[in-house]
Amino acid sequence: DQQVKQNSPSLSVQEGRISILNCDYTNSMFDYFLWYKKYPAEGPTFLISISSIKDKNEDGRFTVFLNKSAKHLSLHIVPSQPGDSAVYFCAAMNTGTASKLTFGTGTRLQVTL
Amino acid sequence: DTEVTQTPKHLVMGMTNKKSLKCEQHMGHRAMYWYKQKAKKPPELMFVYSYEKLSINESVPSRFSPECPNSSLLNLHLHALQPEDSALYLCASSPGTVGYEQYFGPGTRLTVT
């Protein structure tokens, strides 16, 4: 039962263009969402988060959008840089119960020159 | 400083060995976590410690035994593991347990022979 899904296993984007990574969830109790970036042989690095009371959060080149009615969130990276090439995981949490993060399956982003 | 450190980086152990993984953070975080990640899969939560007390055990087999000696340290004691336990073991910490981003260490790559 995959409660958080990232349907695109991989994405290739040209340097300087926008990268859009998508994530869908099924559990309506999730109310806090996070994006992590992971390089091979390293732990996930926190990028950006959003609470369900918001529909957008921005931090530099990274913007996360949340559509609660569609149970969908997306991460926009503008402009994309070669160093952004990594696996991106979205994660969700129900802050009313516990600190358990449920991760999506990940999307491998490759930014080409 | 958002660093979580883990030792060792790599560990190879036989099925009859006893070994321990260590995790340390000096950010004053009050929640610490153990995750297991298999290749091409998302991290899966194993244990959560909140204020040095075990608050979540995700039905992990007893051959994995967590310990939180103080608020900065988290151990995972391993005994009689199986080859299928080979994975990347990630430690994370967060300021509290509700609605906070978790910061991950680089992981310990465990191989059980």
Image: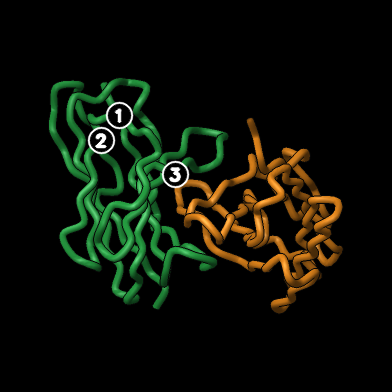
Chain colours: A orange, B green
Query: At numbered mark 2, what does the secondary structure look like: helix, strand or loop?
Result: strand
- Quarter of the image for residue B85 reads top left
Tell me the amino acid under the disc marked 3: Leu
Q: Are marks 2 and 1 in contact (CB under 8 Å)?
A: yes
Tell me the amino acid under the disc marked 1: Pro
Q: Residues within 10 Å of mark 1 (few under 14, many from 20)?
A: few
Give left or right: position of A92 versus A10: left
* Residue A26: % across, % down: 73, 42
Mark 2 and mark 1 on one chain: yes
Q: CA distance from mark 3 to mark 1?
A: 13 Å
Q: Chain of mark 2?
A: B
Disc number for residue B45: 3
Query: At numbered mark 1, what does the secondary structure look like: helix, strand or loop?
Result: loop
Q: Quadrant of the N terminus of chain A?
A: top right
Q: Which residue is mark 1?
A: B61
Query: At numbered mark 3, what does the secondary structure look like: helix, strand or loop?
Result: strand
Q: CA distance from mark 3 to mark 2?
A: 13 Å
Give left or right: position of B87 versus A95: left
First in sequence: mark 3 vs mark 1: 3
Front residue of B100/B7: it is: B100
* Residue A88: % across, % down: 65, 52
Eyeballing the image, is B72 above or below A112? Answer: below
